[in-house]
Image (cartoon, rainbow, N blue to C red):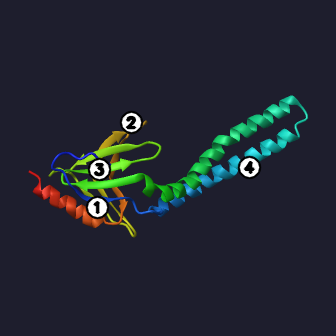
């Protein structure tokens, strides 16, 4: 439930379209993560095998170290290989969008719930990014510094929605009517 202000009415509600939308990015991550996953699983199994055949305590300790050393590699690989697929299947359940006469709302549920409000103002920069199955309407962009001190742009908006063009035009109409 989105808390609305007085004289504010909902014009549109929606959620992301289920599925894998940025296929090239997802395939790149999966291919990049595959060696990490394979190496992590191979080292883990080799460490367990060596542990069962260790003649001395120091050999058993080395096998345990190798097994533990393999866990971060396997975990990172699994995250990169399976993460995009899991996100594609679950994102539409945890994210809800709403457009009102005064603002755009992005509500995330699940593990890290949040509600972000982006006011619709005459000077709000809009961007429509059409896609084959769903489009994205970017409502907000800001420059942020990363850990290296480099500037990068972070965008927010209604991502992967079926009615992107319609919502974009609705926001443009709201901007024209704003004082």
Q: Earlier in the sequence, mark 1 or mark 2?
A: 1
**Element assignment for label 4:** helix
Q: Tag on residue 42?
A: 4
Which residue is label 1 attached to? 128
Q: Position of residue 50 (x, y in %)?
A: 84, 41
Mark 4 to mark 2 CA distance (whole Å): 37 Å
Asked if disc 1 and disc 2 are in contact, CB closer than 8 Å, the reply is no
Asked if disc 3 and disc 2 are in contact, CB closer than 8 Å, the reply is no
Q: Earlier in the sequence, mark 4 or mark 2?
A: 4
Which residue is label 3 attached to? 105
Mark 3 to mark 2 CA distance (whole Å): 30 Å
**Element assignment for label 3:** strand
Which residue is at the front of the view, 127 or 13? 13
**For discs 4 and 2, the disc positioned in front in the rendered view:** 4
**For discs 3 and 1, the disc positioned in front in the rendered view:** 3
**For discs 3 and 2, the disc positioned in front in the rendered view:** 3
Asked if disc 4 and disc 1 are in contact, CB closer than 8 Å, the reply is no
């Amino acid at each position: 439930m989105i808390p609305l202000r007085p004289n504010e009415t909902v014009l549109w509600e929606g959620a992301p379209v289920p599925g894998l939308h940025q296929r090239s990015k997802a395939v790149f991550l999966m291919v990049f993560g595959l060696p990490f996953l394979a190496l992590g699983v191979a080292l883990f199994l080799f460490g367990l095998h060596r542990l069962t055949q260790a003649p001395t305590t120091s050999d058993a300790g080395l096998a345990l170290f190798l097994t533990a050393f393999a866990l971060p590699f396997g975990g990172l690989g699994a995250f990169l290989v399976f993460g995009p697929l899991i996100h594609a299947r679950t994102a539409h359940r945890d994210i809800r969008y709403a457009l009102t006469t005064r603002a755009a709302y992005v509500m995330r549920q699940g593990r890290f719930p949040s509600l972000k409000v982006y006011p619709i103002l005459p000077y709000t920069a809009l961007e429509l990014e059409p896609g084959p199955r769903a489009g994205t309407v970017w409502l907000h962009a800001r420059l942020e510094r990363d850990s290296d001190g480099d500037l990068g742009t972070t965008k927010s908006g209604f991502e992967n929605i079926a009615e992107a063009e319609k919502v974009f035009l609705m926001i443009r109409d709201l901007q024209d009517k704003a004082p």
